[in-house]
Image (spheres, rainbow, N blue to C red):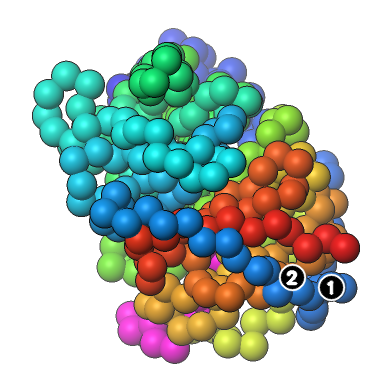
Amino acid sequence: MKVKQRNIDAFKRVLPIVFLFSIVLLGSCHSPSKTEFIEFPVSKTLTLEEFDVSDMLAIPGEITIYKDMVVVWNQETDWFFKIYSLENFDYLGSLIRRGRGPEEEIEISPFIKTIGEDTILYQGSSTVNKARILKLQEDLYLEVLEEYTLPDEMYDDTDIFMVNNNLYASYGMRHFTRDFQGFSPQTGKLFEGGDMLPLNKPQFFSPDELFVLTKHTTVKPDNKYLATAYALLPVIRIYDAESGQLYSEMYMADASKNKQILTNDSPIKEGLINYYFRIKSTNEFIYALYSGKLAGLPEFSEIHIWDWEGNPILHLELEKPFISFDVTADNRFIVASSLFETDKLFRAEIPWD
């Protein structure tokens, strides 16, 4: 709901909220560490195990581990979520039918966030829903715990996540100058959070150019930190979730000169390189899916791993490109989906030794 502050009383009501957000989300007395790295200390190849899921997936996208199950967001079929067992990828069932009827959805954004051990967050066509997946005998059920109606301004925002009972979007089709768009379901207020965009100077992009702001965010399972990765900048940022302060920033030397291309005055942005497309995390590590190839090619065939202090830990070369992945809480296995082999899902044990 939009509220216009036209008198002193209204200003007094909103002032504490503005002050709180400015302290929690924008203010900072901590000097974040900024680390440029050239290579990871260890590099290994990830050996994949393939699982046949023929005739079940049309266009698989986001893949998320939920308890002992794997949830796959799927486009252009009658059901949005396909559920498999984590142990052997047996098909368990489908959830959320496509349609306009009760308990159906017209569209679901291809992002699934886990909250704690038994809750997921997903974005439907009109609400953001917090839910649990229940197994009852041989059937699966989706129990919606909370529904959050987004303000009109956020309808095109995506990669929505939750911190401190507020909803945040990593990016959207509107201009903003900081890393996140925030919304308080309790007050109905919109705000910006996080640090300024990691460009040389504040930028204003036309609606056709807003794709340059694309990024993805993961929240540490214990809710102490969050990390965001840019699609067109070789940058990973770590934030303190409680204070909203930028804690650490890791970046590679931008040999592609993406920053120069993005900040020039030309509306034509040719020669851009894809960097990060998905980011996931456990309580120990941050995992980011990486390309390093020309933008427009969905060839994300590396995974970069850091700890939550921002130290580079491990570089994984993939045998084939992924479109999405997730990691078990014990950092043992990676599961993944691919646009190039839609009849398969993949799992691999992380080669730590």
Q: In the rendering, at what x and y percent does residue 267 appear?
A: 33, 80
Camera-side residue of 20 and 341:
341
Q: Is residue 34 above or below residue 25?
A: below
The residue singled out by tag 1 in the image is 42
Give amino acid for label 1.
Answer: Val
Name the residue: 52% across, 74% down.
Answer: 320
- Where residue 116 sits: x, y (%)? 63, 26
Nearer to the camera, 115 or 42: 42
User: Which residue lies under the disc numbered 2?
Assistant: 315
Residue 337 place in picture, x, y as percent: 46, 58
Q: Describe residue 242's horizontal placement relative to residue 154 as left or right.
A: right
| Range of magenta residues | 264-277
SS for callout 2? strand
Q: Is 324 displayed left or right of 207 in the figure?
A: right
Query: Quick one: label 1, few (<14), some, or many (20+) residues within 10 Å?
Result: few
When the figure is inspected, residue 315 is found, relative to residue 178, above or below; the finding is: below
Which quadrant of the figure has residue 297?
Answer: bottom left
Q: Is the Cβ of the residue at disc 1 closer than 8 Å to that at disc 2?
A: yes
Residue 190 visible to an observer of this rendering: yes
Residue under the image location 29 percent in, 49 percent down: 56
Q: Quadrant of residue 94?
A: top left
